[in-house]
Image: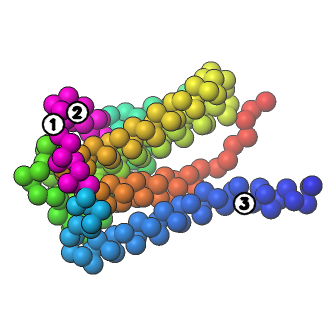
Amino acid sequence: MSRAAPPVRRAVRTAPLTVTALCAAAFALLAVLVTGRSGAPFPLDTDALDWSLGHRSSPAGVTAARAVTASGTGPYPYLCAVVAGLLAGRDPRHRLLAAAGALVFLLAGQAARYGLLAAVARPRPPMADWLTHASGYAFPSGHTTTSALAAGLLIWGLVRLGRRSHAIPGWLRGVLIALLVCWAVAVGLSRIYLGVHWATDVVGGWLYAATWLGLGASFIPARRPHP
């Protein structure tokens, strides 16, 4: 049993790196395919846009989509990053450092994303189909990326908090994590529904965010819970 433990521990440690590498490879492949088509939509993109155009009869649905999409930009994701750091820190000093680090991490991810936007230079769907304001290039989706990064940081903060404290019951942490994942997914889908992004822009945003979060996690030292 003891001989089998080290390989199991190594597999657990390397699993996040493997997932990160797979997400990075998938994102790179998608970016190459988009660039190779000069940004032209894939069949999935046109099908998703056609579906959204056919399901806009409810004003309440459009209003809800606009509200969801608005939560993925502006100050909200950056506030999430600060809260994540405050949750992750084990004392006042470490909380401030973690909050600053999470904020810098999010800003760095945004800066790299802007570079990718300019490099791929993919046009958005036709403006006539938009139901909200948008600007700049399309791939990867900014709202999708930003909300996914913010959700990932908050999940990190909740996990770190759970390792050292029982202030939040495990079941409640699980519910909060599930809600954060749903939020990130909903923001991405709202961009397609509102007609300002192709579906593959949103997929690219999720893959990019997963890659960036995985890279960040690889630099965080593992900590054992205090007795």
Q: Nearer the viewer, mark 2 or mark 1?
A: 1
Give the residue type that dot 2 points to: Gly
For the C terminus, give its image quadrant. Answer: top right
Residue 4 picture quarter: bottom right
The answer to whether one can see residue 116 in this image is yes
Query: Residue at 60% of width from left, 23% of height from top?
Result: 168
Q: Earlier in the sequence, mark 1 or mark 3?
A: 3
**Could you tell me which secondary element the residue under label 1 belongs to?**
loop
Query: Residue at 22% of width from left, 70% of height from top?
Result: 39
Q: CA distance from mark 3 to mark 2?
A: 44 Å
Q: Nearer the viewer, mark 1 or mark 3?
A: 1
Name the residue tied to disc 2: 61
Q: Where are the magenta residues, as a range?
A: 48-72
Dots 2, 1 in contact, CB < 8 A: yes
Q: Residue furthest top?
A: 167
Q: Is residue 111 magenta?
A: no
Name the residue tied to disc 3: 11
- Vertically, is 75 above or below 195? above
**Could you tell me which secondary element the residue under label 3 belongs to?**
helix
Q: Is residue 61 magenta?
A: yes
Q: Nearer the viewer, residue 95 or 124?
A: 124
Q: Residue furthest bottom?
A: 36
- Vertically, is 169 above or below 157? above
Q: Nearer the viewer, mark 3 or mark 2?
A: 2
Q: CA distance from mark 2 to mark 1?
A: 8 Å
* Whole-percent x, y for residue 195 in the image: 18, 50
The answer to whether one can see residue 78 in this image is no
For the N terminus, give its image quadrant. Answer: bottom right
Name the residue tied to disc 1: 57
